[in-house]
Image (cartoon, rainbow, N blue to C red):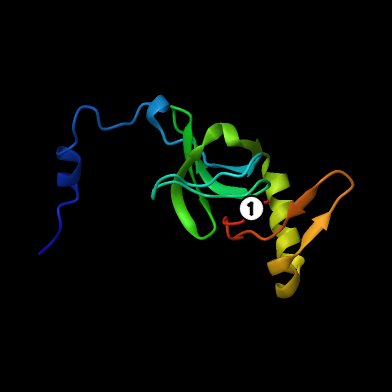
Amino acid sequence: MELDYGALYEVRTPHFYVEANKMPMARCTVKALYDYKAQREDELSFCKQAIIHNVDKQDGGWWRGDYGGKKQLWFPANYVEEIVSTQAQEQDEAVSALSPSTRDHSCLRCSQSCTSLDPYPEAVGCS
């Protein structure tokens, strides 16, 4: 039996093409400005300075993102700032360069701030 590929085109609806404003937005990476403890099961907990990846910006003040092994959970948009991809890449490279023991328990002291480089720290006990 031979497939009729032409039949695929016959079932198109009049609104087959997606309008530009309905196209999915490119996802970004953000850095936490404050600690946030989830209030519900579908929310993301994180510590200040956490890097949240694959962020889907939504209307209404809440975004979705990946952090700590959790995928596409909600968090308040006003708790984070978007970072450019080079900053996110540098952060990821710094984490990869650390040994496992350093990655699990340390904090690098910079001239102005302390940044935890563990990409998946436990959100409980943020300081």
- Please, which residue is most extreme toward the right here? 111
Q: Which residue is mark 1?
A: 126
Q: Position of residue 114 (x, y in %)?
A: 79, 50
Q: Residue at x 26, y 32 (%)?
A: 16
Q: Position of residue 31 (x, y in %)?
A: 65, 43
Q: Position of residue 110 (x, y in %)?
A: 86, 50
Counting every numbered tag in the picture gives 1
Q: Nearer the viewer, residue 93 or 114?
A: 114
Q: Residue at x 48, y 47 (%)?
A: 38
Q: Nearer the viewer, residue 72 or 86?
A: 72
Question: In the image, 54: left or right of 18?
Answer: right
Q: Is residue 116 above or below residue 79?
A: below
Q: Residue at x 41, y 25 (%)?
A: 21
At label 1, the amino acid type is Cys
Question: In the image, 116: left or right of 28?
Answer: right
Q: Is residue 121 above or below residue 44?
A: below
Q: For the residue labelled by badge 1, is the local secondary structure a helix, a strand or a loop?
A: loop
Rate crowding at label 1 as few (under 14), some (14 to 19) or many (20 or more) other CA atoms within 10 Å: some
Q: Is residue 34 above or below residue 18?
A: below
Q: Nearer the viewer, residue 116 or 9?
A: 116
Question: In the image, 27: left or right of 121?
Answer: left
Q: Is residue 90 above or below residue 96?
A: above
Image quadrant containing the N terminus: bottom left
